[in-house]
Image: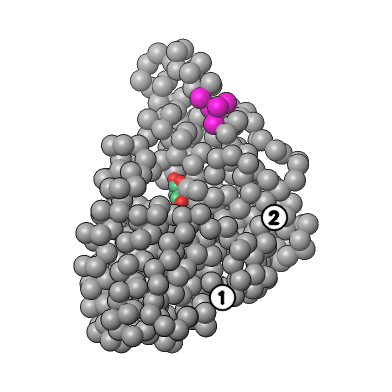
């Protein structure tokens, strides 16, 4: 079975074809970073327009790269939420019209479910059940995954998401959008022990909080910047702040993940979402797993950030949920993961 996946929930257009026998056949990804960079964040209307311009040509290209005709597709999976409603509508319209024209099912996919399933596409695939640490620009969740469509959120952020905190602190440091990767890069030349930033909610429950940490960074930066005279000392200050902030976020994510593994008694931890591409987080969790005796699984970094592959693969996993009749366009900007069952 060949499933074409369409991701348009935010600022990446991702298209891919997953074949249940041969695996990933072709993929394309376009990131709108440049369009939004000068605004310091995603402008929803510009995101929708860009998805309109790019999605159909990219889709044709991916079908050609896979050496296929459109008629060789068996289903079209698309991100139905959560995300920006206009952006979701673009992918949904393309998916539904194509599916209607080809007489095949359109499968509405939950973006976060796709993030947490994609690790199973890797060679070292985690079996169910597992715990997922889902860390993206909009979400920070600890999810108990019993099986496909069986999700229980046991921890979440009370304020900012981890990726959002990275992006906001990156802005304070005048780093280019999107901030996470730029901040992680700057952190490699800084001292993570230079500043002892707070680890909010440490030792308490499974929820996260990052907004106090962000404020602590802002205050420290304001205070120290007024004293840092030369370009060199200001460069060192920024790198040290980046490294110390990253250490605080990673500490929180690792501490809660370890606690959740102990509380649930699960044996596998899956790290998913854009912040899952963070090298420091990956190595710290790996070490924690070795120490505590649980397995840690990551999708490759390009599968952590938004992409079409995870949507195509989730479509394959959800092939049994296809509805009969003409495809409807579904777009749910807000859509709690725990509402999912085996039928969307
Ligand atoms: O999953 P994703 O691509 O999009 C959402 O669904 O939100 O996650 C994007 C988030 C952004 O906040 C970005 O700054 C962050 O992931 N991110 C990172 C890294 N790569 C992406 N944060 C820290 N370190 C990274 N290497
Ligand atoms: Zn995402």
Left or right? Give the position of 312 relative to 276: left
Q: Quadrant of residue 331?
A: bottom left
Q: Give the residue number, with chain letter if any, for mark 2.
A: 154
Q: Is residue 134 magenta?
A: no
Please, is residue 276 above or below residue 28 in the view?
above
Quarter placement of the N terminus: bottom left
Q: Which residues are magenta?
A: 214-218
Q: How far across and down, in percent of the image, does residue 80 sit?
A: 44, 64
Is the C-beta of the residue carrying label 2 under 8 Å from the nearest atom of ligand 1? no
The secondary element bearing badge 1 is classed as loop
Report the Cα–Cα distance between label 1 and label 2. 22 Å
- Nearest the viewer among 119 and 2 is 2
Check if mark 1's residue and mark 2's residue have beta carbons within 8 Å: no
Q: Quadrant of residue 117?
A: bottom right
Q: Residues within 10 Å of mark 2 (few under 14, many from 20)?
A: some
Q: Residues within 10 Å of mark 1 (few under 14, many from 20)?
A: few
For the point 25% across and 54% down, which residue is it?
50
Q: How far across and down, in percent of the image, does residue 317 sit?
A: 51, 77
Q: How far across and down, in percent of the image, does residue 222 sit?
A: 48, 18
Q: Is residue 216 magenta?
A: yes
Q: How far across and down, in percent of the image, does residue 264 sit?
A: 76, 61
């Amino acid at each position: 079975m060949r499933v074409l996946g369409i991701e348009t929930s935010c600022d990446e257009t991702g298209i891919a074809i997953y074949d249940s026998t041969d695996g990933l056949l072709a993929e394309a990804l376009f990131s709108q970073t440049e369009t939004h960079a000068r605004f310091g964040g995603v402008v929803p209307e510009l995101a929708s327009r860009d998805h309109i311009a790019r999605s159909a040509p990219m889709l044709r290209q991916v079908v050609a790269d896979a050496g296929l005709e459109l008629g060789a597709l068996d289903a079209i999976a698309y991100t139905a939420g959560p995300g920006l409603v206009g952006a979701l509508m673009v992918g949904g319209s393309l998916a539904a019209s194509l599916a209607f024209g080809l007489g095949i099912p359109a499968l509405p996919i939950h973006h976060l479910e796709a993030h947490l399933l994609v690790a199973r596409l890797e060679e070292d695939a985690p079996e169910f059940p597992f715990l997922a640490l889902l860390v993206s620009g909009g979400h920070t969740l600890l999810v108990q995954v019993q099986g496909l469509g069986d999700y229980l959120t046991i921890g979440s952020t009370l304020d900012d998401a981890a990726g959002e905190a990275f992006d906001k602190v990156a802005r304070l440091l005048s780093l280019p959008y999107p901030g996470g990767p730029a901040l992680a890069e700057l952190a490699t030349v800084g001292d993570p022990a230079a500043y002892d930033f707070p680890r909010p909610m440490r030792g308490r429950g499974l929820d996260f909080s990052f907004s106090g940490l962000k404020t602590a960074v802002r205050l420290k930066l304001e205070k120290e910047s007024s004293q840092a005279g030369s370009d060199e000392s200001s460069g060192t200050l920024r790198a040290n702040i980046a490294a110390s902030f990253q250490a605080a976020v990673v500490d929180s994510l690792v501490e809660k993940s370890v606690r959740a593994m102990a509380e649930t008694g699960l044996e596998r931890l899956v790290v998913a979402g854009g912040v899952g591409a963070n090298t420091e987080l990956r190595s710290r969790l790996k070490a924690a797993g070795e120490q505590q005796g649980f397995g840690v699984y990551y999708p490759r970094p390009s599968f952590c950030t938004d992409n079409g592959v995870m949507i195509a693969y989730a479509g394959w996993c959800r092939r049994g949920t296809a509805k009969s009749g003409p495809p409807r366009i579904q777009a749910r900007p807000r859509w709690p993961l725990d509402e999912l069952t085996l039928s969307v």
